[in-house]
Amino acid sequence: MATWDCSLPLKNRSFILHMHLPDPKIISYQSRALPEYGDELLLRLYTSLLLPRLVEEKMLLLLRRGEISKWFSGIGQEAISVGATLAMNQDELILPLHRNLGVFTTRQVPLRRLVAQFRGSAAGFTRGRDRSFHFGSLDYNIIGMISHLGPQLAVADGVALAHRLREQSKAVLVFCGEGGTSEGDFHEALNVAAVWNLPVIFLIENNGYGLSTPVEEQYRCNRISERAAGYGMEGISIFGQDLLQVYEQISSLATSIREEPRPVLCESMTFRMRGHEEASGIKYVPDQLTKSWGEYDPIALFENQLVSGDVLSTAQIEQIRRELNQAINQEIDEALLDTPVEFDSRGELSDVFAKVAPLPRVSRLGESRELRFVDAISDGLRESLKRHSELVIMGQDIAEYGGVFKVTEGFVGEFGKDRIRNTPLCESAILGASLGLSSQGIKSVVEMQFSDFISSGFTQVINNLAPVHYRWGMPADVVIRMPCGAGVGAGPFHSQSKESWFLHTPGLKVVYPAFPADAKGLLMASIEDPNPVLFFEHKALYRSLKGQVPQGEFYLPLGEARVVQDGEDISIITYGMGVHWALAIAAEYPQISVHILDLRTLCPLDIEAVKLSASLTGRVLVLHEASKTCGFGAELSALITEHCFSELDAPVRRCASLDTPVPFHPELEKNYLGRSQLGKIFEELLEY
């Protein structure tokens, strides 16, 4: 099998990169004999290749008529989508991009539903909540893209990890464009796949341009496949216009990977014949480039091979086209009659989260024992690992070392390294992999070594994990542990409390316990929850706070606040370290009856408990450690003002930390924290 020549001398690089021309050393299609596949398979290959082209031609007509709003053309690239999809087994996952219509048609996704998806109709896979191919369907073993392009590579890692953990002989296929290879997610995903020997085919569609940016402004190597050596994996380049070459190469790779799990980087050279999307046009593309690649249209090339090999005649080809067009027109006509999407705010809100099953019933609550906060978390993880035999914990240094806070110390000996997985320094890739595991029904807990580091995986959390259930119904069964908080002299990058980042993102649950028993019960409940949960753990409480913690399985439902102390004069509504500040200030003013409400979970929020607390005293102080501006206290204040204004005797007051980064020096840090201002604000509210 001839493949794209990767041995071009360096002196020719700039010309090839700039022009992205077809290599003159590619095979001659006219002289190439068809493989001994049999007419039935060759006919299937041809109809599968032709179908997305004919569908797209209809889509372009619908676009001009205003029936669909946007289209990303894959004309000229069909051989990659179709050949690669046919090479995979039906039960193997494929993660395509926005030019891979051929993946969906080859997997026999009903065209009527695809058109409904493109139009935003109620029958579409996202019911109007997302467009184009920003969806997946596990019924067809497809996981869709998001606009950020690179994050799906790590999701493929997670799917492949599930196959390895279950000892399944399966491969995973994930698409990426040459522009996406410039993203950090590309590096992280390939690095993790290589380190863990994951059975993933990373298929790069190198079509010359990322929107208008040519390849010489994207990378400086001769071929993207050359990068594979840097990760310790195989890399090949193939000619993406040759359906048979794509089919044979991917088939060979998939077969080999099923037997010997490992990742492979496969670059498929192709060209984008139309604009990035239809509105952008192609004026920036040199005419010579378009003309040169136009001679390698994959459908024309394969038709010539079939005619030359006496598999089909020209008349038969025309007949196939007529029959396919007739079927396409019928499906589209029916799709255009589908019910338009109707807005229902209650339905929209109810679909943000996956439905939560009742928490497991514990027949007899075990005896309690005194545990430190950190040990309560460790105990909750251990109980969940015993309950869920496939639960995986991932994080930096969590295996033999036990994590920097020793939460998972001893876990490797008890549960093994497959389930207690050390990870490379790849926050984004590991968070993406957790979504891939969830797609296969495997729960995971991801430890951020410090909560501050989650910013390196922000896209995965905010744009992948959070909206995926709302968009197309897939749960993101992931708990992200977040060691956080100041007060230990750790400085600006190890002390932040950034819960408000995530509370502004629909689809994420946020938990922030203040006591050891709550930490265990809420953590175990979070692991049972099929939605992504950010679980904040204050580092300063780890070894300074002890409490009675029930043994064995123990669950506390998310969304239920707890009254820590009854009172009538003033309410302090808080969570995390703020609860202990509130208890301290109440002790300093024994003559004042202080009502302290520990929220415990910030999303879902116990709104009724908040309103009741405010109504009981008429004076409310909202307290948290995070910086004041746009902190969660602002939301609580607005909520109380909206719902309890007539019952208030004073304005709602907020007490929070300064609007500065967290300083390192103990004296600076002490005065940064909201605790330093609490007494003054407390007294002002009482005196109002």
Image (spheres, grey):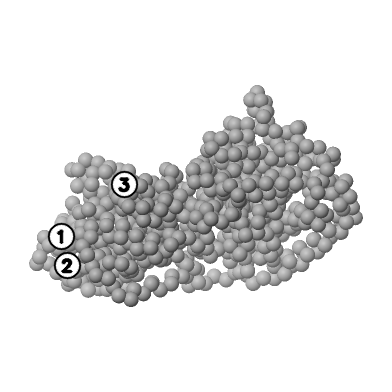
Q: Position of residue 100 (x, y in %)?
A: 66, 52
Badge 2 or badge 3: first in the primary sequence: 3
> For the residue labelled by badge 2, is the local secondary structure a helix, a strand or a loop?
strand
Badge 1 or badge 3: first in the primary sequence: 3
> For the residue labelled by badge 3, is the local secondary structure a helix, a strand or a loop?
loop
Q: Name the residue at the bottom extreme.
A: 363
Q: Are marks 2 and 1 in contact (CB under 8 Å)?
A: yes
**Tally of numbered discs:** 3
- Residue type at the position of mark 3: Val
Judge left or right: residue 135 versus residue 101.
Answer: left
**Relative to the observer, which residue lies in front, 37 or 496?**
37
Q: Position of residue 622 (x, y in %)?
A: 25, 61
Q: Quickly name the residue at label 2.
A: 594
Within 10 Å of disc 1 (Cα), the crowding (few <14, some 14-19, many 20+) is some
**Residue at 52% of width from left, 43% of height from top?**
194
Name the mark nearer the viewer: 2 or 3: 3
- Residue type at the position of mark 1: Ile
Q: Quickly name the residue at label 3.
A: 404
- Residue type at the position of mark 2: Val
